[in-house]
Structures are given as structure tokens and as C-alpha cells.
Amino acid sequence: MHKSKAALFLMELLIVLMFFSVASAVCLQLFFYAHKTNRESSDLSNANILFTNAAEDFYHDSAPEASENTAFFDSDLNLCDPSCAAFTVTSKITYNSDENRVYDNISVSLAGDGQILISKELIRYERLVKP
């Protein structure tokens, strides 16, 4: 009696296909995780640049007015309309005349979902002007 080896070959083929399908599923998950991590890292880097620019404006402005300002930036960090914005920078300047301090609460958030990436309060001491 002659036995056919086709059944054994098909079984081996199914095992190999299962192995490759599991390996490809793991690789796809790693690819999507890396893409998500890259996007979050890029957003944080851009938010850091925008925050640094806003902080430098605050520290170098000789007489900032008490106000609340909002600026919108696209993904290339250029000023734009709120409809095409990727980032929102909010700056709220307040004074404390008793202590001669100026406060600026700066926050950078994603424009789409409003997730705050960076938020910090800056303090600047004003010099007393002698009469």
C-alpha cells in the first residue's frame, strides 16, 4: 500500500501560514505603535518650540498689558486661522502690583481635541522706577 504525502505537506503548509500570519500581526501592531509614538513626539517638540517663543516674548516685552491672547498655528508652526490650526497657544497676563510681579500663564494645546501639551505659569519681577 502506497501512502500519499499530500496530507503531511498540507499540514506543514498550514502551520507555516499560521506562523507568518501571527508574525505579520505582531509587526503591524509594532508599526502602528511606532507611528503613534512618532506623532506624539513630533507634537511635543512643536509645542515646546511654540511655548519657548511665547515665553521669550513675555520676558522681552518691556511693558506687557494685562490680557488674554490666543494664537493659532498650523502644522508648520505658521500663524493661521482657527479653521486650519493644528496648535493653539493661549497666554493670560496678570499683574500683582503689591509684589511688583507680572504673571503669564501659557498653555499650548492641540487644536483638534484640545489636549494640553504644555502649560506653565511664568513670573517676571518688575523693577521699581525711582522718581
Image (tube, rainbow, N blue to C red):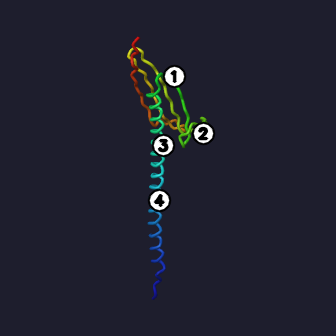
Q: CA distance from mark 3 to mark 2?
A: 16 Å
Q: Which residue is mark 2?
A: 84
Q: Which residue is mark 4?
A: 25
Quadrant position of the N terminus in the picture: bottom left
Whether residue 110 is situated above or below residue 95 in the rendered picture? below
Tag 2 secondary structure: helix
Q: Which residue is mark 3?
A: 43
Question: If you read the primary sequence from the N terminus, does the residue marked by circle 2 or circle 1 appear first?
Answer: 1
Tag 3 secondary structure: helix
Q: CA distance from mark 2 to mark 4?
A: 35 Å
Q: What's under tag 4, amino acid-wise? A: Ala
Q: CA distance from mark 3 to mark 4?
A: 27 Å
Q: How dense is the environment of label 3, judged by Cα within 10 Å: few (below 14), some, or many (20 and up)?
A: some
Looking at the image, is mark 3 or mark 4 nearer the viewer?
3
Q: How dense is the environment of label 2, judged by Cα within 10 Å: few (below 14), some, or many (20 and up)?
A: some
Quadrant position of the C terminus in the picture: top left
Q: What's under tag 2, amino acid-wise? A: Cys
Question: If you read the primary sequence from the N terminus, does the residue marked by circle 3 or circle 2 appear first?
Answer: 3
> In the image, residue 117 lies at what x, y percent?
46, 37
Q: Which residue is mark 1?
A: 67
Tag 2–tag 4 contact (CB < 8 Å): no
| Residue at 47 percent of width and 32 percent of height | 54
